[in-house]
Image (spheres, rainbow, N blue to C red):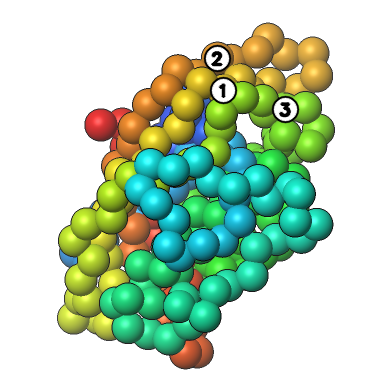
Amino acid sequence: MTHRNRPTITLLACLTTAASLTACGPASPEAGQPNTAPPSASSSSSPATTPGAPASSPASTGGPPARPAAAHGLTLAAAEAFYRYYIDLKNYAAATGDTAALLAASETGCEGCSDYASYVAKVNVANGGISGDYRERIKEITQLNRGSTGRVGGSAVIAVGNFTTKNSPTSSPIISKPAEYTDTIALSAKGQDWVMYEMLFEAR
């Protein structure tokens, strides 16, 4: 199991600015890791997602999005397709509270991944903890490169809209305004596919 230092980030960086969370690890030479962001809800997997387009509603699919064919393999093109799929998994988990597929696509030692999963398992759309335009949307993916360790790193610009979170039924709602974030990521190989190694969400 890999353990990495966990920089503190806010809830988009588990949803956007609602609560303190931590990312998977320090920015690595190959890619700092991103996403511990406030509940970003579900979206069905579509590697061809148009930048800035709203994610599709995963809650209506009856299950988590399946990894698309383009996201299989260890090429840079597969890395980009996997990252788009991973955002779909995050959105699905935030919508439903079901984090099994998200964790299966994450390295065991990715603490940011597990922190995000733990949060949305408790605070999600299905149980009334999240409402509004919480889905993460990819606007741009840049600088995907393979490092000397074989991992792939890069960054993306992620947008969310107005959304509200409640950490418990009796807690005061936290309203988050539309915002953009830089998601720095590192992917590692697991078998013949990529998984999320580390991620870090930072406000732009």
Q: Residues within 10 Å of mark 1 (few under 14, many from 20)?
A: many
The C terminus sits in image quarter:
top left
Badge 2 marks a residue whose secondary structure is strand
Q: Is residue 138 above or below residue 167?
A: below
Measure how far apart labels 2 and 3 are at the Cα level.
Answer: 12 Å
Residue in the image at 80% along x and 57% along y: 62
Residue 177 in view of the camera: yes
Residue 20 in view of the camera: no
Mark sitting on residue 163: 1
Residue 181 figure quarter: top left
Q: Residues within 10 Å of mark 2 (few under 14, many from 20)?
A: some
Residue in the image at 76% along x and 60% along y: 63
x%, y% of residue 37? 48, 39
Badge 1 marks a residue whose secondary structure is strand
Q: Nearer the viewer, residue 63 or 119?
A: 63
Residue indicated by mark 2: 175
**Viewer-nearest of labels 3 and 1?**
1
Residue in the image at 65% along x and 63% along y: 65
Query: In the figure, is residue 175 to the left or right of 7?
Result: right
Q: Is residue 100 above or below residue 93?
A: below
Mark sitting on residue 129: 3
Residue 165 figure quarter: top right
| Residues under numbered marks 2 and 3 in contact, where contact means CB atoms less than 8 Å apart | no
x%, y% of residue 74? 37, 85
Mark toward the start of the polypeptide (2 vs 3): 3
Residue in the image at 79% along x and 37% along y: 126
